[in-house]
Amino acid sequence: MTQRAAIEVEALVREFRKGPRAVDGIDLAVSSGEIYGFLGPNGAGKSTTVLMLTTLLPPTSGHAWVGGFEIGRHGADVRAVIGAALQEAALDAILTGREHLVLQATLQGLSGEHRRRRAQELLERVGLTEAADRRVGGYSGGMKRRLDLALALVHSPRILFLDEPTTGLDPQSRASLWEEVARLAHDEGMTVFLTTQYLEEADALADRIGIIDHGRIVAEGTPAQLKERVADDLRLELVLEPGAALPELPPFVLRDVGSGQRHLATVAASAAAAAVGWAEAAKLDGTFEEYRLGPATLEDVYVELVGRPDALSNGNGVPAPDPATSLEDARVRAA
């Protein structure tokens, strides 16, 4: 029998009735112990893919194996080896954090003493010991996210699905969650499938990244490999004064996609001096509030491929969900 990757997908499709072809024949493979970052704008198909891989949504066609089990034929086996923290945490405001974990451990069949030990261990791991016996209704958004992660880990899954886990979190909470995700993969060998709209998150955490747009994977590789696409370019970030219009772009600008007051332009390295001169003149004219010129980043790769930086969250707001939003608060923890 052929040994399959931790997650293996072949020509996976999901069409919604009277709706979009949300996932359009994607192929991918994620190795054991790998953190795979799944990037894309709102509605690109990220969450729909996760819902299929976690058996919450049947595919229209194609095949996928998770933990060696085919999602359409062995759903219970898939659910036994995975944990999932989806976009909306399904938490009961009346229960405490500890009660949530003990209940989840009970559903997973852990013995009385084992479930209490496991609950305490996970509370310590995600930094919720002081709030363990408080009702979850009084938790902050970051605390709820951390509890949701702990719930996904109760049964020590081999594969962890995280769907936009840090959306809306403050920088300190995001950094804490990043640290724990990296530890799970690198120290415990857990496979992590991470969907995100934060480019810096994917860059910092992911061993490999797949970029999906309109239901299709448009690029895949390590962060370094993806950055090689724009290795010889420079990134010119322009912040317009309120009410100012973007002036006509000079010929040395290779790419530009506007996003309100913030514009990202890509220029050839040989045009650096010309770019600075043009930006300085526009700043003196009151067009630009500020500008920055530096090495191209993963965001520039994204702009090149997808062309819509505004579709990625900058951490100041909650991104719009994928088409399967109504299912996002379902849990995948019971076998």
Image (tube, grey):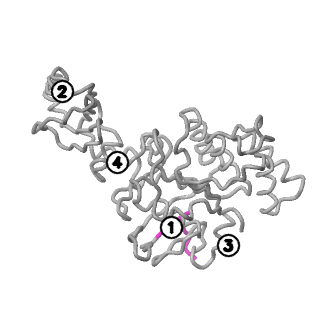
Q: Which residue is mark 4?
A: 226
Query: Which amino acid, mark 2?
Result: Ala
Does label 1 or label 3 sit earlier along the sequence?
Answer: 1
Label 2, label 4: how many angstroms apart (C-alpha)? 28 Å
Q: Is residue 145 left or right of residue 108?
A: left
**Magenta stretch?**
1-9
Q: Position of residue 49 (x, y in %)?
A: 48, 64
Position above or below: 77 against 130: below
Q: Which mark is residue 8?
A: 1
Q: Residues within 10 Å of mark 2 (few under 14, many from 20)?
A: many
Name the secondary structure under disc 3: helix
Does label 2 or label 3 sit earlier along the sequence?
Answer: 3
Does label 4 or label 3 sit earlier along the sequence?
Answer: 3
Label 2, label 1: how many angstroms apart (C-alpha)? 47 Å
Query: Which amino acid, mark 3?
Result: Ala
Q: Quadrant of the N terminus?
A: bottom right
Label 4, label 3: how many angstroms apart (C-alpha)? 36 Å
Name the secondary structure under disc 4: helix
